[in-house]
Image (cartoon, rainbow, N blue to C red):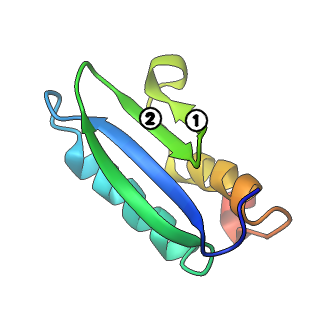
Amino acid sequence: MTPARESVVRIEYCTQCRWLPRAAWLAQELLGTFEAELSEVALVPGTGGVFRVSVGDAVVWDRREQGFPEPTAVKRLVRDRVAPGRALGHADR
């Protein structure tokens, strides 16, 4: 686990598919929820239908395997890496 304020989330999205708005929305959700725990949320342009979320070197969501994520699902996965044990309120239900 990475110490607080040094955790980096990467959201790789397909530019050919025009998924930047979706990636930016997810980045906004993560930054709003984990403002004290994350040092950076990077939007990484890609191609070939990619939509992948990573925390550090660990991929926590890949559209090819899991479909498009709901923000609450990604928040839980990010929380488990950067702030284990932290309650997410309604997102934990």
Image vertical order of residue 52 relative to residue 43, above or below: above
Instruction: Residue 93: tell me if it is visible.
Output: no
Picture coordinates of residue 80, whole percent (x, y): 76, 54
Residue assigned mark 1: 59
Q: Secondary structure at mark 1?
A: strand
Which amino acid type is marked by label 2?
A: Arg
Answer with the quarter of the image where residue 92 lies.
bottom right
Q: Farthest bottom residue? A: 36
At 54% from the left and 24% from the top, the residue drawn is 66
Instruction: Residue 60: tell me if it is visible.
Output: yes
Q: Are marks 1 and 2 in contact (CB under 8 Å)?
A: yes
Tally the marks. Answer: 2
Which amino acid type is marked by label 1?
A: Val
Q: Rate crowding at label 1 as few (under 14), some (14 to 19) or many (20 or more) other CA atoms within 10 Å.
A: some
Locate residue 34 relative to residue 28 in the image: left or right.
right
Answer with the quarter of the image where residue 79 lies.
bottom right
Locate residue 33 relative to residue 44 in the image: left or right.
right
Residue assigned mark 2: 52
Image vertical order of residue 40 relative to residue 61, above or below: below
Residue 24 vs residue 89, the one in the foreground: 24
Q: Farthest right residue? A: 85
Picture coordinates of residue 65, whole percent (x, y): 53, 18
Q: Rate crowding at label 2 as few (under 14), some (14 to 19) or many (20 or more) other CA atoms within 10 Å.
A: many
Picture coordinates of residue 72, whole percent (x, y): 58, 53
